[in-house]
Image: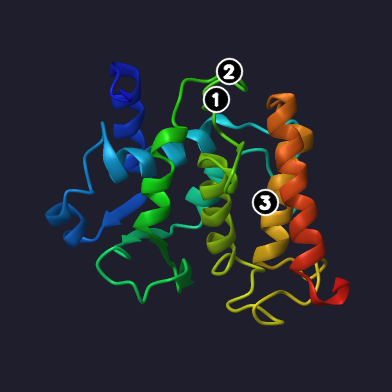
Amino acid sequence: MALCTPEFAAEAAIIRREVSIDFADSLRESGYLGDDCDGIVANTVNMFRVLKAIRFDAPMPLVGGTSLYEWYRSLDLRLHIVDDFADPSIKVSYAVGNEVFMMASRMRSIADALADGKGAPGVPRYFLRQTSAGIRGVGMIAGVLVHEARHPAPGGDANHTCPPNDASLDEGGSFALQYWYFRWLAEHAQLTHEEARLAQELANDIATTRFCDRL
């Protein structure tokens, strides 16, 4: 699908200036990388475009504001898209210091989720959707970014405190922020009814499976 309208190209240029993103060289060699109009580059830019479009109607816990995009920018992180196609030993996204590493396969998997918005302004129609493989969409991938960005953020946890989970919601770690992200999508983001329902389902799943004091 064509993402490269003049409006998208202008937004992409701004995002590439405002956040640090780099891509593994091997992705270009394999043909997966694409550019601002297509492929993994376009999908990554669109993830930030979506975060920029979402404005919550109340400050989000642990973020302290209504814009996840501005919160992310304030952290001055560098995002690396790593090539897990070429290196199958890479099985998770992670953060080290002020650097976040996300798998290229995740960015490629949202290619079919980038349709024009019918929910909140600027948010793709398939921001969240139910599929036979579970809940998918660019909103899921953005949730991974939010989770990983919490690790190096002030007050975040460098590592999970009850591996592979967090000890509690109250300690405010990466799973806590991911929980609040989905809950705030459900309650404060003006998504479609179905997308809000899916976001609440994801928040409930994190609440019951990712905090050791609730297991």
Check if mark 1's residue and mark 2's residue have beta carbons within 8 Å: yes
Q: Position of residue 86 (x, y in %)?
A: 24, 67
Q: What amino acid is labelled 3 in the image?
A: Val
Question: In the displayed image of the protein, which residue is found farthest to the front?
Answer: 132
Closer to the chain start, of discs 3 and 1, is: 3
Secondary structure under badge 1? loop
Question: What residue sits right under mark 2 in the picture?
Answer: 118
In-front residue for pair 176/164: 164
Locate residue 193: give its quadrant.
top right
The CA distance from mark 3 to mark 2 is 26 Å
**Total numbered labels:** 3
Question: What residue sits right under mark 1 in the picture?
Answer: 125
Q: What amino acid is labelled 2 in the image?
A: Lys
Question: In the displayed image of the protein, which residue is found farthest to the bottom?
Answer: 162
Closer to the chain start, of discs 1 and 2, is: 2
Q: Position of residue 113 (x, y in %)?
A: 47, 34
Q: What amino acid is labelled 1 in the image?
A: Arg
**Residue 60 visible in the snapshot:** no
Residue at left 39%, top 38%? Answer: 111
Query: Quick check: 200 left or right of 97?
Result: right
